[in-house]
Amino acid sequence: MIITKNYRLCEWSGGAIMVEPESYGRCPVCGNTNLKYRDYCRRICREIDDVTKCYIVIRVKCVRCGGLHRILPDFMRPYGQYSEKAVHDVVSGRVHAEEVIEYPCNITMSRWKNKNH
């Protein structure tokens, strides 16, 4: 995964949102900057109380090591469905389990808190 702060969000077909990075960055495996566009994939991102949006993220391939990487915007967490803001709000205490109607569940919120301490 490559996390970027420099991107544009554009409307995509079917209500999805395309994440267009300004650059591909560096390969996290070998550090090479020669990354080639490969394809794209869908990725969901959830907020508190199951507000879900679908994003289209670009996948690039490293010319040197052959690694395949997704370019994620900084509001997404690698390998997770919930946004960076949702997790931060729970861990920092801005959102409490009693305030959440459905998602994320109490077990997930407890795991986030324990992992970040």
Image: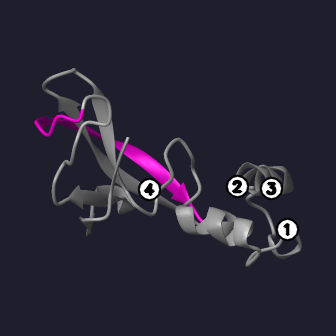
Q: Is residue 57 left or right of residue 90?
A: left
Magenta segment main secondary structure: strand
Earlier residue among tags 3 and 4: 4
User: Which quadrant holds the C terminus?
Assistant: bottom right
Q: Label 4, label 1: how many angstroms apart (C-alpha)?
A: 25 Å
Query: In front of the other: label 2 or label 3?
Result: 2
Give the residue number, with chain letter if any, for mark 4.
Answer: 54
Marks 4 and 2 sit apart, C-alpha to C-alpha, by 26 Å
| Residue designated by label 3 | 105
Count how many numbered circles sit on residues in the image: 4
Q: Amino acid at mark 1?
A: Ala
Tag 2 residue? 116
Left or right: residue 45 versus residue 58 is: right
At x 67%, y 68%, the residue is: 48
Mark 1 vs 3, N-terminal side:
1
Disc 3 + disc 4, Cβ < 8 Å:
no
